[in-house]
Structure formats: structure tokens, C-alpha cells
Image (cartoon, rainbow, N blue to C red):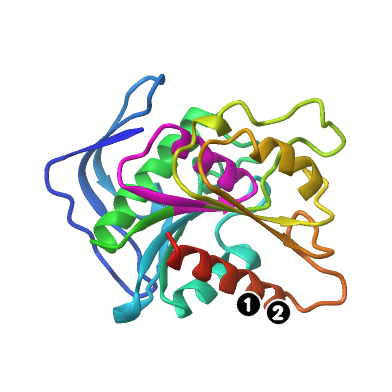
Amino acid sequence: MHLTIVGAIPFTHVGAINLTVVGAIQLTPVGAIPLTIVGAMGLTQVGAIGYEAGAAASALLVLGHGAGAGQQHPFMVSMARALSAKGVSTVTFDFPYMREHRKVPDRAPVLEAAFGEAIAAAGEWARGLPLFIGGKSMGGRMATHLGAQQLDGLKGLVVFGYPLHPPGKPDQPRVVHLPSITVPTLIVQGERDTFGTPEELRPVLKTMKAPVTLHVVAKGDHSLTVRGQKRDDTIAEVTDVVVSWMAKI
């Protein structure tokens, strides 16, 4: 996926770090219809919130949310805050259907284009930092779509709970694009994930050409929730895994 930025793109950093991008951004995914968005792109359109790591920032991570909840879900907020505290400036955003309070997610090309807009805005907000993208479940899958399209400047992918297939439907795998990914990829998967267990994932990951790291959260479900364990403890564990992995890329 090639992002062509036309004209100057100033941004506004206010309070909770709202991102405002002005100008025209042309998104041209490989094999998709080019999409041009012209005019002001503020928080209501890009749906982005930045969690700044400050002077200690070592990387930029743009995260997309899962299908059922937006960027204000406790998992997304807790993960973004924990990562920024560990030196990873993090940006979250809402996909169009979530911003418009619709229950059914948009089709993949629309989700990919929205992800691209957030990436462009985040890149202006955190210039010069190595770029990683990822997300929770559906958001992570869309990140892998962009990774398979060779997104310019991308250093790696971070996926929390890859939705290998719908629950109870292993005959509907979401894997055709995975061998096209060329950047290092980290997948954090719950041991009890009904969208795809680590055992189901491992043979699929062997088909990928890119270096892939699979971290299993013991007893974790699709949301990486572990019975009897505080969410903050799980977030801390996963954050350490992500930061350590990024340091090796």
C-alpha cells in the first residue's frame, strides 16, 4: 500500500493529543480502487488519540480496535498507556462504522483506508520514529492486510488475538494474505482463543516468509483475559513482550 501525501499536512496537538491533518491524502492500496480524501481531517474523521512516550520514545505503534468495541475500550486504553510508559508512542483510532455508531464493520477496503489515514496522521505527530502497526482482533487483521501490501516505511506488525477464523468455524480461515507479509510480525494469542488457538495458528505461521514470533498468554481467551488474574498484570506481561520484541527489530 503506497501513501501519497499531497501538500503540507500540519497537525494540532491539543489536550488529550487530538490529531488534526489538513490537506489531501491519496491512498492507493495495491489491487484496490484509489481513494482520495480532500479537506480537513480532524479527530472526528481520523478518530485518532495519541499516547506520547516523550523524549524516551523509541518507536511509534498505530493500533486498530476489535470489531465489537472502539478505541476507548479498556483493553485499548490500558495497552496504549502501558506501551507509552515503556517508550512506545502509541496512536489509537476508530474505524468509520464505530465513529458513526453502526454495529456492522465496514468492508476491508474501507477499514484499510481508514487505517492508512491514521498512519499518515500518526507519522506527522511522531516524526522520525520507527513505524509499527497492529491492533486487537479485527484491527490486527487489518494491519496484516496493510503489511501484505508492503506499506512504505513499515518496521513490523503487532497483533493481539489474531482472528484466524470465526468461532466454531475453522473451515473459514483468514490466511490467504499472510504469506505476502514481508516485515517481522509479533502475534500475542490467548491459549483458549476461540477465534484460533496457538495450536491452530502454528502451522499457518509456518507458511509465512516473514519472521514471526508467537507469544502465548497462558489460559488467556480472545481478549487475553486470564481467569483469576488482574487485567493490569496481563497488560504488563504483554507490554514487556512487545517492547522487548521491538528492541530486536
At a point 35% along the width and 64% down the height, the residue shown is 18
Residue 36: image location, x then y, percent: 28, 30
Residue 243 shows in the view: yes
- Percent x, y for residue 123? 29, 55
Image disc number at residue 85: none
Image quadrant in which the N terminus is located: top left
Which of the pair 86/3 is nearer the observer?
Answer: 86
Q: Quadrant of residue 72?
A: bottom right
Residue marked by disc 2: 233
Q: Are marks 1 and 2 in contact (CB under 8 Å)?
A: yes
Q: Which residue is painted at 41% across and 35% down in the image? A: 113
Residue 65 shows in this picture: no
Give the SS element for disc 1: helix
Mark 1 neighbour class, 10 Å CA radius: few under 14, some 14 to 19, many 20 or more: some
- Residue 37 vertical placement versus 58 (above, below): above
Among all residues in the image, which is located at the extreme left?
7
Q: Which residues are magenta?
A: 133-157
Q: Position of residue 169 (x, y in %)?
A: 84, 31
Most foreground residue, 179 or 177: 179
The disc labelled 1 sits on which kind of residue? Ala
| Amino acid at the residue labelled 2 | Asp
Q: Is residue 19 magenta?
A: no
Residue 98 vertical placement versus 216 (above, below): above
Q: Residue at x 38, y 35 (%)?
A: 150
Q: Is residue 149 magenta?
A: yes
Instruction: Compare residues 240 and 37 and report the one nearer the observer.
Output: 240
Q: Is 218 placed above or below 53 here?
A: above
Name the residue tied to disc 1.
236
Residue 106 in the figure: left or right of residue 54: right
Is 68 placed left or right of 146 in the picture?
Answer: right
Residue 24 horizontal/vertical position (percent): 21, 38
